[in-house]
């Protein structure tokens, strides 16, 4: 199953502000800003507005649109809740981004019924929990399920029964195949390949670089759902709206990122042993520095402590930063809990972090936080930034 929230950020804004419902909504910033569209409601898409399009171009296409700055931390919280719902259906969940995931629902029939009923169960559970629309595609492979969810949008489901994959794929435009971008699409069109069926029947030897898409076009896709139980890395990064040399600001972001990584580890019952700091400078030069801890951890304080030390070693008066990231690797299950308990005040710290997680899961990030993060919210919100969440399988 491929489950994908519909126009995710824009739907959250419409949910929280009734005046935006039924209206073209563009998330990304003011209409005259130099940034790009991060999400567009279906009403805005009808005007040709797309994600990654410059905001000014979007304003030209859809002058009546409502432009909103976006609230990444809220979207991130909603995402955690949605992923939690997915995991309550099956432990085999592979998130692709904040708003979409593959779910291996093999064996869920006894609990939830037919594939269609499983899909409806997931959609209902998401609607009930976060009041947002989601579309679901169900098929025997990842590639077909993802295409099916795209066709199910908005707010629908699409099932492709086993054996009917080729009939389903054949008439669809070839760009719907994973790995076929605008460039490949143009090259294929020059050879008379317009539909997935055209590609499926094409001799793969005549176009080596298209072997993989051609295989997917023939509905062959043996990839498993790579759940986070096998994750190798959990990380978050931010790209600043404006490059900065403000060390204090960078540290606040690093604390925020560490906090988020810690919460994601705890939410999934994982620990990590190696903490990595990623820095990208204004000239795009990028470095990664890492340290291996004495014991695996899922604690924000441990992650941030390591990152702060790594940053202190690298920092230089002349440096101007474009992006910072925090990643935890050496991921394992939380069996190392007893080990961690040996470490001093761990006994008191863990319930605090867990209590924080629970309060924030129910009421949102803004309600409660570490004192060190206080006062930073307004400033961080005023900086527009792009939030990136990685789970590398
Ligand atoms: Mg989506």
Image (tube, grey):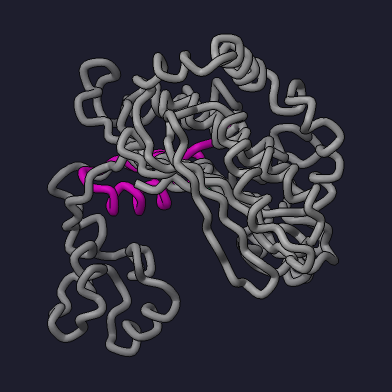
Residue drawn at x 59%, y 14% is 345
Check the image and name the residue furthest to the bottom. 190
What segment carries the magenta color? 132-158
Image position of 123 with respect to 378: above or below? above
Residue drawn at x 16%, y 86% is 206
* Relative to 82, 179 lies left or right: left
* Relative to 115, 353 lies left or right: right
Q: Position of residue 312 (x, y in %)?
A: 68, 50
* Relative to 347, 311 lies left or right: right
Residue drawn at x 26%, y 68% is 213
- Residue 118 is inside the magenta segment: no
- Residue 38 visible somewhere in the drawing: no
Residue drawn at x 62%, y 36% is 305
Image position of 125 with respect to 34: above or below? above
Q: Position of residue 296 (x, y in %)?
A: 42, 30
Q: Position of residue 128 (x, y in %)?
A: 55, 21
Q: Quadrant of the N terminus?
A: top left
Q: Position of residue 89 (x, y in %)?
A: 36, 23
- Residue 149 is inside the magenta segment: yes
């Amino acid at each position: 199953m491929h489950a994908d929230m519909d126009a995710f950020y824009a739907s959250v804004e419409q949910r929280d502000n009734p005046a935006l419902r039924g209206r073209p909504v563009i998330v990304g910033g003011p209409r005259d800003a130099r940034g790009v569209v991060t999400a567009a409601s279906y009403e805005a898409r009808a005007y040709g507005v797309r994600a990654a399009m410059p905001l000014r171009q979007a304003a030209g296409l859809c002058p009546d649109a409502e432009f909103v700055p976006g609230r990444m931390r809220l979207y991130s919280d909603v995402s955690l809740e949605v992923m939690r719902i997915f995991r309550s259906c099956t432990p085999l969940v592979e998130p692709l981004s904040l708003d979409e995931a593959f779910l291996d629902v093999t064996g869920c029939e006894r609990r939830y019924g037919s594939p269609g009923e499983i899909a409806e169960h997931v959609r209902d559970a998401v609607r009930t929990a976060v009041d947002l629309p989601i579309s679901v595609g169900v098929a025997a492979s990842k590639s077909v399920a993802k295409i099916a969810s795209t066709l199910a949008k908005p707010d629908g489901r699409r099932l492709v029964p086993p054996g009917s994959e080729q009939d389903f794929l054949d008439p669809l435009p070839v760009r719907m195949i994973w790995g076929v971008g605008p460039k490949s699409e143009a090259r294929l069109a020059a050879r008379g390949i317009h539909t997935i069926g055209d590609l499926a029947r094409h001799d793969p030897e005549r176009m080596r670089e298209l072997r993989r898409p051609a295989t997917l076009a023939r509905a062959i896709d043996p990839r498993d759902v790579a759940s986070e139980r096998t994750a190798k890395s959990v990380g978050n990064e931010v790209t600043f709206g404006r490059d900065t040399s403000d060390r204090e600001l960078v540290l606040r972001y690093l604390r925020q990122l560490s906090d988020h990584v810690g919460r994601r580890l705890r939410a999934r019952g994982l620990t990590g042993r190696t903490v990595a700091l990623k820095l990208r400078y204004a000239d795009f030069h990028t470095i990664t520095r890492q340290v291996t801890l004495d014991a695996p951890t899922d604690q924000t304080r441990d992650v941030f402590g390591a990152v702060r030390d790594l940053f202190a070693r690298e920092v230089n008066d002349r440096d101007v930063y474009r992006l910072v990231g925090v990643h935890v690797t050496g991921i394992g299950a939380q069996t190392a809990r007893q080990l961690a308990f040996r470490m001093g005040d761990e006994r008191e710290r863990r319930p605090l972090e867990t209590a924080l997680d629970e309060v924030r899961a129910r009421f949102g990030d803004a309600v409660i936080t570490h004192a060190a993060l206080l006062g930073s919210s307004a400033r961080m919100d005023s900086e527009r930034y792009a939030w990136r969440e990685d789970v590398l399988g």
